[in-house]
Amino acid sequence: MSNSSSIRHFLLLALADTQQLQLLHFCLLLGISLAALLGNGLIISAVACGNHLHTPMFFFLLNLALSDLGSICTTVPKAMHNSLWNTRDISYTGCAAQLFFIMFFLSAQYFLLTIMCYDRYVSICKPLHYGTLLGSRACAHVAAAAWASAFLNALMHTANAFSLPLCHGNALGQFFCEMPQILKLSCSKSYLREIEVSLFSISVAVGCFVFIAFSYVQIFRAVLRIPSEQGRHKAFFTCLPHLAVVSLFLSTGFFAYLKPPSMSSPSLDLVVSVLYSVVPPVLNPLIYSLRNQELKATVWRLMTGWFQKH
């Protein structure tokens, strides 16, 4: 038995129990992180350098790429360090910082995906009002609101989680400091405090989900009314990348944070956490660039220009 005042470090989940497997996990995590850095870095560079990409859709995509980079850089480097040096330790302050940043970047992703859904709704259902509703100033304001809301949400949960007395040791069943794992260490009575704090965040998350679902119902209704089959296909494939990203993020994130304790197991928790925190930063650049000719052309010009200089 221990309390939070006596805890100086936490023990993260070991990804493997042999040195060979640890080195394999290190190489795998290194490849994943490099792929995420390359993909999101190219999107950020393409949107920043391509004047023809200075539109609301690509502005929000740039912000999403920044949140992807932040989330992958929050969780993977420490896991790589632990695999390489055969350790499980993370300091108390390091765990608090990791929890804050992962919640900050994941919350920002969710809010940005909601805004991007609104962007698709306006472009398809209200195209004549697109420039008015999503001007440059409006885009900057809603993006700033998304980041500020994510900051406040992360600060509120991190401050509350680390003010709870921890009565069940310091071993976490995850390879990074995750909110459900911290709550498992807290005393049973104090656990209710985080549930009370979470009610507001859950209501906001559900509100965003309802907004996304309602928007896509309106979008699909508008697409089906387009007389041209080519026009319907173009409108549908404009929304398909966003819908794929939202589906992956929401299904894994909601399952990780809202699943009943009876369904929890170390292997299942590990797989789900990888799906919502590590996989999206790698897949999002691919999903958004595969069917976007403008983005692919700009990225290709950047890459060929760099190779020609070097």
Image (cartoon, rainbow, N blue to C red):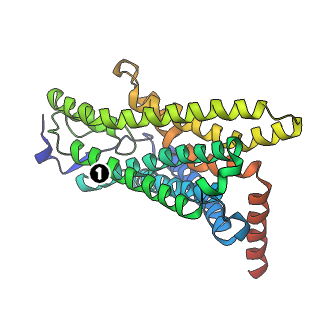
Say which element carries label 1: helix
The C terminus sits in image quarter: bottom right
Residue at 45% of width from left, 59% of height from top?
Answer: 144
Of the pair 175 and 19, the residue shown nearer to us: 175
Residue 261 seen by the camera: yes
Give the amino acid at mark 1. Leu
Decide: is 104 above or below 14: below
Q: Residue furthest bottom?
A: 309
Residue 84 seen by the camera: no
Quarter of the figure with residue 166: top left
Mark 1 Cα shell of 10 Å, populated few (<14), some (14-19), many (≥20): some
Of the pair 288 and 20, the residue shown nearer to us: 288
Decide: is 59 above or below 174: below
Asked if residue 267 lies left or right of residue 129, the reply is: left
User: Which residue is denoted by mark 1 in the rendering?
Assistant: 155
Residue at 48% of width from left, 59% of height from top?
Answer: 141
- Residue 46 in the image: x percent, y percent? 68, 66
- Residue 79 in the image: x percent, y percent? 43, 50
Decide: is 220 above or below 260: below
Residue at 61% of width from left, 64% of height from top?
Answer: 44
- Residue 81 in the image: x percent, y percent? 42, 56
Of the pair 127 and 64, the residue shown nearer to us: 127
The N terminus sits in image quarter: top left
Of the pair 121 and 58, the residue shown nearer to us: 121
Residue at 49% of width from left, 57% of height from top?
Answer: 143
